[in-house]
Each structure stands twice: as structure tokens, then as C-alpha cells.
Amino acid sequence: MEKYDPKKIICGCDEAGRGALSGPVVAAAVILPNNFFDKRLNDSKKINEKLRYELAGVIREKSIAWGVGIIENTKIDQINILNASIAAMHKAIEIIEKKINHKKINLLLIDGNRFHKYKNIKHKCVIKGDAKYYSIAAASILAKTHRDNIMKQLSKQHPEYNWLKNKGYPTKEHKKKIIKYGINKYHRKSFKLLETQYSLKL
């Protein structure tokens, strides 16, 4: 993992749920102490669920500040998933600013290659940043676990889609469930929910 100037306030940002067919996109922003170290921390997709939740607790406890932003599926359909992902990051950053009493964040580290400037704060987009910077990896963990919790709750309302397991992602099982039961209000209508050989009433 790389490090930045310890005198600067660095905030890492990442999102979860960008490729899902249902549910919200969730972003997290995290500022870690300069001496933070946990060898278990990595891209949330490379860590099993049990460890993700353990690390989420550590991050919330030991971080200087953290925030989570959520953009619902209906808004995703209106502004597209890229803009929704960035909007969720902006929400998370705004929460952090309030927690640190509006102290100046010197740099935003953004996972991926696209971002809309947030106020006058400098930002750097980092491809696969969750494997390069602790703050991005930490944001990845918080975003993933927070969204998983949302999908688990939604699964209680709609157990027929098995979101408890697939979290709304386009697995074969999820697509079969859509064919069988149709879609509901939590599905993203602007997404290609099924292959073209299937018909789907929206």
C-alpha cells in the first residue's frame, strides 16, 4: 500500500453496487490515521464476508472520520449509474466534512478513472485504488458491507429474488428469478436486465 504526506488530510472514496440490477449504489469516504495499518485490508471483493464485517468495525472505530452516501435505484435510472456513483461519493464526502468540522481535506483519492470535482478539493483517480491505498480499501469495505446490509433487508421484503445471496447482481439465478417473477420497484429499469432473447414487461 502506498502512502501520502502524513501532514495532509487524505480521504479515500469507493462505491459498491455499480453493476447490480437492483438496489442502490452506495459509496463510502474514509480518512484514516497516518499510522493505520492492518495487513488484512484489501479490495472488498477479495475478502470473504466474515472478514469484511470484522474490518468494517475496525475502520469505523479507528478512522478519523467516515461517511456513507446512498443513491436509490430510481435516481440511478434518472441520471445514469456513473453520475449516481459519483453523487453517492459526494454525499459521503459531505458527511466527512461535517465530522471534521469543515477542516480542509487536502486530497480525495477516488477508486476508478472518473469523478466530478467536489467543491475546490483536489482529487486523484486511481485504477484499482482499493489495492493500492488503505483509505480507498477502507472505503471499499464500508461501502460493500453497508450495501449488503441494505440488500439483506430488501430480501426480507422480496425473498423470491434471493438478494440475500446475490445482492442484486446479475447472476444466472437472479436473471431466472426475474423471468419467473418479473421485476419490482427496486430493479433498475434503465439497465439491461435480461438478454435480448427474453421479453420483459416494464
Image (cartoon, grey):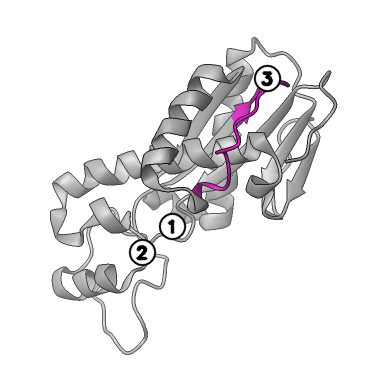
Q: In this view, does 26 lie to the left or right of 98?
A: left
The residues tagged by marks 1 and 3 sit, at their Cα atoms, a distance apart of 37 Å
Q: Marks 1 and 3: which is nearer the front?
A: 3
Determine which residue is flagged by label 2: 189
- Crowding at dot 3, Cα within 10 Å, few <14 / some 14-19 / many 20+, comes out as some
Q: Label 2, label 1: how many angstroms apart (C-alpha)?
A: 6 Å
Spot occupied by residue 63 in the image (x, y as percentages of width and height): 58, 20
Mark 3 belongs to which amino acid? Pro
- Of marks 1 and 3, which one's residue comes earlier in the chain? 3
**Helix, strand or loop: magenta stretch:** loop
Give the answer, above or below, for where 77 lies relative to 84. below
The residue pinned by badge 1 equals 77
From the image, tell me which residue sits under label 3.
33
Front residue of this view, candidates 74 and 150? 150
What's the residue type where badge 1 is placed? Asp
Span colored in magenta: 30-44
Q: Which amino acid does label 2 sit on?
A: Lys
Residue 36, quarter of picture: top right
Looking at the rendered image, the quarter that the N terminus falls into is top right
